[in-house]
Structures are given as structure tokens and as C-alpha cells.
Image (spheres, rainbow, N blue to C red):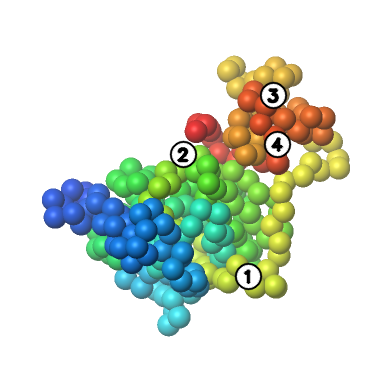
């Protein structure tokens, strides 16, 4: 992309966010007020008054290279490796799974699918002003939280689930594999739309019905039977139990991340209580991103 075009689009998007008429940073706020007026209850969910509609891609708020099918369930990036941002057509509730299948993979690029959530109401976002990338552009310019899936995930045919927990943690799972924590710090308390970036090696995705019986079930992460070698820790990143291996797990639901997987699973098998806060442990999830800030 030419630097001048990227700069112009960035300026358009920032101008949109700072619009004094309430179309920018208040876009999600206005939508939240509209949702409350429809339900008649402050802070209630739009789904409280009616069943959830099936998730589809928003028809107009999409990257310049994105083409949708007639049903709005398939998004394809036509050219280049970016300009593939798409949104859900309605807000997604905490805990609600967004389920998609990767239909087409393109090996000539590096990096792949990004997923997350945003407070931007896509109905109020001019498509022409969308930046080329969700990470870091859209994150830096708005209340958006997204992350790239680990390398080797999201190949053609894979089913990807992602969701935000009631504690503001972004999780994902691929096929029938383990949950993994992508990031923390997602702010709740206002409507959140799913946002996806059909980026790089990911060429085409399709939104699926999460209740379909044919989908592979996602399962909590469990330790493998074979012994895995734990990575040695860099200074300041040691497990607070063994002080040798890297702290690479997250305890669910408290979110503490001070332990290597060996020690975390020993604690889970022994007392199932977090050594830091003594909360009951429900699961142990691997960290797959660079750093983790706890809520």
C-alpha cells in the first residue's frame, strides 16, 4: 500500500473517531443507549428481549479487499495480504462462541487470521476509513482487542472458535483441540462486536452455527501423556514454584500466570487452588502470546 494512501485512510478513521456529533468514540455508546431503549432496561442485553440471530458478517463495514457471499456468511479476501477486516452484524455476548471455518489458505504470505472484539458499532463505521490491519492499527485507533492465532492454526478446513469470558479474557480453540488464552484486558460493560482480519495466509472464512452437531467439540487443555521438555526461563519470567522453567500457563478462572505447565498441573492435581489467591481452579490454559497482563 502506498504510504500516502495509508496516511489518508488513517486520517479519515481518526477524524471519524473524533467526530463531535457522536459518530466516533461515542458510536458504541450511542448504540448501547439504543439497545437499552429497545429492551427497556438499563444495562440489559439486546438478547434479553429476543433470541439471538445467527452471526453473519456486517454487509457494509468491511475491508477494501473483502467480498461476501449473498448470505453474508462467507468472507473472501480478493487480493494482496491485508485490507481484510470484517465484523459481526450484531453484538456478541460474553461467553458466546464465534465459530468459523477456514475455507481457503494461501501459502505465499506470512501470518494468518486475527480475531477479537471491538466496541466500534460497524453500522457507524465508514468502510472506506478502515485501516488495513486490525493489529495494531484498529487496536491503536479504537477500543478493539484482537490477537493473531498461533502459527500452524487456521489451515484450510479448520474450525476456529473464539470468545471473551466474563473476566475480559479472549480465548480460542481450533477443531477439537485445547483452549488457549490469546490476551486479557477486554473491557466489558458495553456491546462488543466480533472482529476478524482475513489476513496473510488466511484467504476465505465462513461463519458457522455454533449449535451444529457436526462441529468438533472444544475441550479444556489437558497435559499430554508423553513428557514435554519445559523451556528454560529468562530473567524475571521464572515459574514462582520451581524458579527454573518459564511461566507459560494461565490458571482459570483467576487468571494468574506465574507458573510453568508442570507445576501448574501438579497444583491442579493436588489442591486445585491457585497458590496466589486460593481461588478454586477450573482449568489450566497455555499462554500463546508474548506477555500477559492480569486484570
Give the vertical position of 201 relative to 249 (above or below). below
In three-dimensional space, the C-alpha distance between marks 2 and 1, rounded to whole angstroms, equals: 28 Å
Check residue 114 in the rendering and tell me which mark sits there, or answer none: none
Can residue 270 be seen here? The reply is yes
Check disc 1 and report the residue beneath it: 211
Within-10-Å neighbours for mark 2: few <14, some 14–19, many 20+? some
Q: Earlier in the sequence, mark 1 or mark 4?
A: 1
User: Mark 1 or mark 3, which has the lower sequence index?
Assistant: 1
271 on left or right of 59:
right
Question: Marks 4 and 2, Cα distance to the nearest angstrom?
Answer: 20 Å
Going from N to C along the chain, the mark reached first, 4 or 3, is: 3
Considering depth in this image, is 196 or 4 the residue closer to the camera?
Answer: 196
Q: Which residue is mark 2?
A: 185
Marks 1/4: CA–CA distance:
27 Å
Label 2 or label 3, whichever lies nearer to me, is 3
Q: Are marks 2 and 3 in contact (CB under 8 Å)?
A: no
Secondary element under disc 3, as helix, strand or loop, is loop
Tell me where residue 168 appears, x and y as whole percent: 50, 43
Which SS class for mark 2?
loop
Q: Report the front residue among 275 and 68.
A: 275
Using a 10 Å C-alpha cutoff, classify the residue at mark 3 as few (fewer than 14 neighbours), some (14 to 19) or many (20 or more). some
Report which residue position mark 4 lands on. 281
Question: How far apart are labels 2 and 3 at the CA level?
Answer: 22 Å
Q: Residue at x 64, y 63 (%)?
A: 158
- Confirm whether residue 62 shows in the render: no
Label 1 CA crowd tier, 10 Å (few <14, some 14–19, many 20+)? few
**Which mark's residue is nearer the viewer, 4 or 2?**
4
**Pointer 4 or 2: first along the chain:** 2
Amino acid at each position: 500500500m502506498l504510504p500516502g494512501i495509508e496516511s489518508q485512510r488513517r486520517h479519515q478513521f481518526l477524524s471519524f473517531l473524533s467526530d463531535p456529533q457522536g459518530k466516533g468514540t461515542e458510536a458504541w455508546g450511542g448504540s448501547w443507549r439504543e439497545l437499552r431503549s429497545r429492551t427497556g432496561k438499563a444495562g440489559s442485553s439486546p438478547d434479553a428481549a429476543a433470541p439471538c440471530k445467527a452471526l453473519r458478517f456486517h454487509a457494509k463495514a468491511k475491508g477494501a479487499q473483502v467480498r461476501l457471499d449473498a448470505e453474508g456468511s462467507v468472507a473472501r479476501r480478493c487480493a494482496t495480504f491485508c485490507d481484510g477486516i470484517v465484523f459481526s452484524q450484531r453484538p456478541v455476548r460474553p461467553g458466546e462462541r464465534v465459530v468459523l471455518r477456514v475455507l481457503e489458505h494461501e501459502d505465499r504470505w506470512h501470518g494468518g487470521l486475527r480475531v477479537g472484539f471491538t466496541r466500534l458499532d460497524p453500522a457507524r463505521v465508514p468502510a472506506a476509513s478502515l485501516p488495513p490491519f486490525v493489529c495494531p492499527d484498529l487496536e491503536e485507533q479504537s477500543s478493539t482487542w484482537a490477537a493473531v492465532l498461533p502459527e500452524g492454526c487456521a489451515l484450510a478446513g479448520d474450525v476456529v472458535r473464539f470468545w471473551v469470558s466474563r473476566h475480559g479474557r479472549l480465548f480460542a480453540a481450533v477443531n477439537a483441540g485445547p483452549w488457549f488464552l490469546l490476551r486479557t484486558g477486554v473491557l466489558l460493560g458495553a456491546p462488543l462486536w466480533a472482529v476478524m482480519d482475513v489476513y496473510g495466509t488466511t484467504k476465505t472464512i465462513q461463519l458457522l452455527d455454533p449449535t451444529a452437531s457436526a462441529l468438533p467439540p472444544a475441550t479444556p487443555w489437558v497435559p499430554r501423556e508423553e513428557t514435554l521438555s519445559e523451556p528454560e526461563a529468562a530473567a524475571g519470567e521464572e515459574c514462582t514454584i520451581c524458579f527454573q522453567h518459564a511461566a507459560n500457563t494461565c490458571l482459570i478462572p483467576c487468571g494468574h500466570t506465574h507458573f510453568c505447565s508442570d507445576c501448574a498441573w501438579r497444583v491442579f492435581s493436588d489442591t486445585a487452588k491457585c497458590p496466589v489467591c486460593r481461588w478454586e481452579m477450573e482449568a489450566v490454559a497455555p499462554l500463546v502470546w508474548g506477555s500477559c497482563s492480569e486484570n
